[in-house]
Image: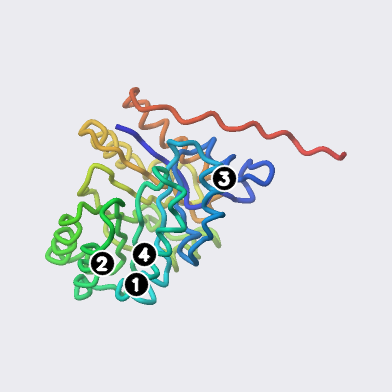
C-alpha cells in the first residue's frame, strides 16, 4: 500500500527549485511525476541516467510513449521505435511506474483492435496505462466495456483525466480559458481495473475550489488504499503555479484519513538570492 502524488512537470517558474538539478529539488516535494517530455521525442539514454540520478529509489515516473508511436503511427508498425524507446528509459529501472499510452481524441472504439494488438505484443515486464479521450468511451457503456476487456487481458489500467472541477463554472482567467479550449470534457470515471490506479485531476486557479473539487477523490483513494491498492494521483491547475503545493496538500488530506501512508519527503530549503 503506497500513495504517489505529483504534477505534470518537474519545473515551473513559480516553484522553489534551486540550482540546475530541478528534478532533484522537485523529488523532495513529490514522489511521482508525469514524464510528458518523452511524448515529444525519445530521450537519450544519458539524459534518462541523469533523471535516475536525481531521484531516490522510491520515486516514480509515469513515462508517456512518444507521439510517433501513439499519434502518428497509432500503435501500428512501431516495433523498432518501441524497442528504441524502452532501451532509452531502461536506466529508470523500478522508478518507471508505468508506460503511459495517451491516445488522440480521434482514437475511437473502432480502433480498439490496434490497441489490443499493441498490448498483446508489448513486453510483459512493463506495466501499461492507457488514456483515451474519444467521447464514446465515456458516454457509451458498450464502448467502455470493450476497452476494459482489452485492458483487462493484459492487466493494463485506464487513466481518467478528471476535468469536472475545471468545467464546473465558466473560466475567470486566461489560463482557465486556455484549459477550457484544450482539455477534454468527459464524464468522471471512478472505476479501476488494477492494483495501481492512476488519476489526472485538473482544478482551477482558485485553490479553495480545487480542494473542494477533490473531496470525492480523497474518499476514493482512501477506499483504494483500504483495498490494498497503490494509487498515483497527478494534480494539475490551469497554470500549474500552485500544483506543487496542491499535490502535497492532497497527500496530507489522504494521510489524515489513512495514517499508515508513508509521509512525503521534506522539501529542500531554498536560500534567498543574494547580490554577490
Q: Of label 2 and label 4, which has the lower sequence position? A: 2
**Residue 221, above or below 156:** above
Q: Report how far apart the C-alphas of labels 2 and 1 lie in the structure.
A: 9 Å
**Residue 230, above or below 137:** above
Q: Residue at x 37, y 26 (%)?
A: 256
Q: Of label 2 and label 1, which has the lower sequence position? A: 1
Q: Of label 4 and label 1, which has the lower sequence position? A: 1
Residue identified by numbered label 3? 23
Q: Of label 4 and label 3, which has the lower sequence position? A: 3
* Contact check, label 2 and label 1, Cβ < 8 Å: yes
Q: Residues within 10 Å of mark 2 (few under 14, many from 20)?
A: some
- Image quarter of residue 158: bottom left
- SS at mark 1 in the image: loop
- Callout in the foreground (4, 3): 3
**Residue 183, above or below 195:** below
Residue 32, given in percent of the width and then of the height, sits at 44, 43
Q: Which of the numbered marks, if any, corresponds to residue 78?
A: 1
Q: Residue at x 37, y 51 (%)?
A: 200
- SS at mark 4 in the image: loop
Residue identified by numbered label 2? 118
Q: Residue at x 42, y 64 (%)?
A: 84
Residue identified by numbered label 4? 184
- Callout in the foreground (2, 4): 2
Along the viewing direction, whichever of 15 and 197 lies nearer the viewer: 197
Q: Report how far apart the C-alphas of labels 1 and 3 lie in the structure.
A: 30 Å
* Contact check, label 4 and label 1, Cβ < 8 Å: no
Amino acid at each position: 500500500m503506497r500513495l504517489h502524488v505529483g504534477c505534470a512537470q518537474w519545473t515551473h517558474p513559480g516553484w522553489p527549485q534551486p540550482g540546475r538539478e530541478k528534478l532533484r529539488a522537485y523529488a523532495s516535494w513529490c514522489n511521482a511525476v508525469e514524464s510528458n517530455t518523452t511524448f515529444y521525442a525519445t530521450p537519450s539514454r544519458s539524459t534518462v541516467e541523469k533523471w535516475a540520478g536525481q531521484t531516490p529509489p522510491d520515486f516514480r515516473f509515469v513515462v508517456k510513449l512518444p507521439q510517433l508511436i501513439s499519434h502518428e503511427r497509432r500503435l501500428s508498425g512501431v516495433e523498432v521505435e518501441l524497442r528504441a524507446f524502452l532501451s532509452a528509459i531502461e536506466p529508470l529501472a523500478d522508478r518507471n511506474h508505468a508506460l503511459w499510452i495517451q491516445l488522440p481524441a480521434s482514437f475511437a472504439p473502432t480502433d480498439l483492435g490496434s490497441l489490443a494488438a499493441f498490448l498483446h505484443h508489448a513486453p510483459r515486464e512493463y506495466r501499461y496505462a492507457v488514456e483515451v479521450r474519444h467521447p464514446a468511451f465515456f458516454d457509451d457503456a458498450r464502448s467502455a466495456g470493450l476497452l476494459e476487456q482489452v485492458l483487462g487481458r493484459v492487466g493494463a489500467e485506464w487513466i481518467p483525466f478528471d476535468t469536472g472541477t475545471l468545467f464546473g463554472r465558466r473560466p475567470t482567467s486566461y489560463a482557465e480559458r486556455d484549459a477550457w479550449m484544450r482539455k477534454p470534457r468527459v464524464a468522471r470515471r471512478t472505476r479501476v481495473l488494477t492494483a495501481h490506479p492512476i488519476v489526472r485531476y485538473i482544478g482551477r486557479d482558485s485553490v479553495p475550489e480545487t480542494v473542494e473539487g477533490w473531496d470525492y477523490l480523497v474518499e476514493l483513494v482512501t477506499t483504494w488504499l483500504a483495498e490494498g491498492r497503490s494509487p498515483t494521483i497527478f494534480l494539475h491547475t490551469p497554470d500549474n503555479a500552485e500544483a506543487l503545493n496542491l499535490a502535497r496538500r492532497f497527500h496530507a488530506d489522504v494521510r489524515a484519513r489513512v495514517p499508515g501512508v508513508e509521509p512525503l519527503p521534506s522539501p529542500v530549503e531554498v536560500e534567498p538570492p543574494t547580490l554577490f
